[in-house]
Amino acid sequence: MQNIVEFHIIGRLGKIDAAEKVTHISVAVNYNRREGETWKSDPQWHRVTLFGKLRDRLAKTTIGDLVRITGRIGQSSYKVEGQTRYSVDLIADGFAILAKAKGRPADGEAGE
């Protein structure tokens, strides 16, 4: 039996940082939490890495679009000034536009 770890994010597209072969995006998700008698929104940002054809699909998006991203979770380490630092990487396998930033549904973009 194969063991896997996956993620699934539905959120709003933020910063897009494209390089030659990889693109990193930020996606905002909102969690509601209760503080006393009131509910507050607790937005959190997640950095996701895209490669290949998913980068082409990203070209059809704009900041603020509602997107669904699925993928795998990886770990990496690197050295900074002699100290080893560790990170958790969200690597996208699927990317879909659910709604455009102005609230319009995405035409034909539901597939991964």
Image: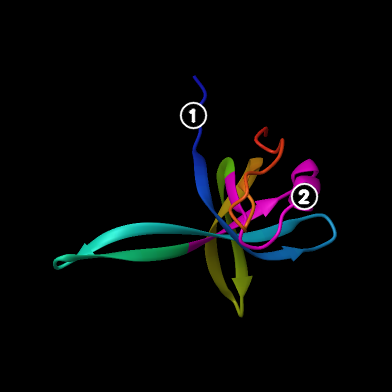
Residue 106 in percent (x, y) is at 67, 43
SS label for mark 2:
helix
Mark 2 against mark 1, which lies toward the viewer? Answer: 2
Write down the residue under mark 2.
Answer: 55
Write down the residue under mark 1.
Answer: 3
Q: Callout 1: 10 Å neighbours few (<14), some, many (20+)?
A: few
Residue 108 position (above or below residue 39): above
Three-letter code, disc 2:
Arg
Residue drawn at x 79%, y 42% is 53
Q: Residue furthest bottom?
A: 81
Q: Callout 2: 10 Å neighbours few (<14), some, many (20+)?
A: some
Question: In whole angstroms, how far apart are the C-alphas of marks 2 and 1?
Answer: 27 Å
Write down the quadrant of residue 52 in the picture.
top right
Residue drawn at x 61%, y 80% is 81
SS label for mark 1:
loop
Residue drawn at x 67%, y 32% is 111
Residue drawn at x 57%, y 40% is 70
Residue toward you, 57 or 39: 39
- The mark that comes first in sequence, 2 or 1, is 1
Residue 109 in percent (x, y) is at 70, 38
Residue 22 in percent (x, y) is at 77, 55
15 falls in the magenta region: no
Q: Residue furthest top?
A: 1
Q: Which residues are magenta?
A: 45-68
The quarter of the rendered structure image containing the C terminus is top right
Three-letter code, disc 1:
Asn
Residue toward you, 105 or 21: 105
Q: Residue furthest left?
A: 37
Q: Count all numbered tags in the image, as a single digit.
A: 2
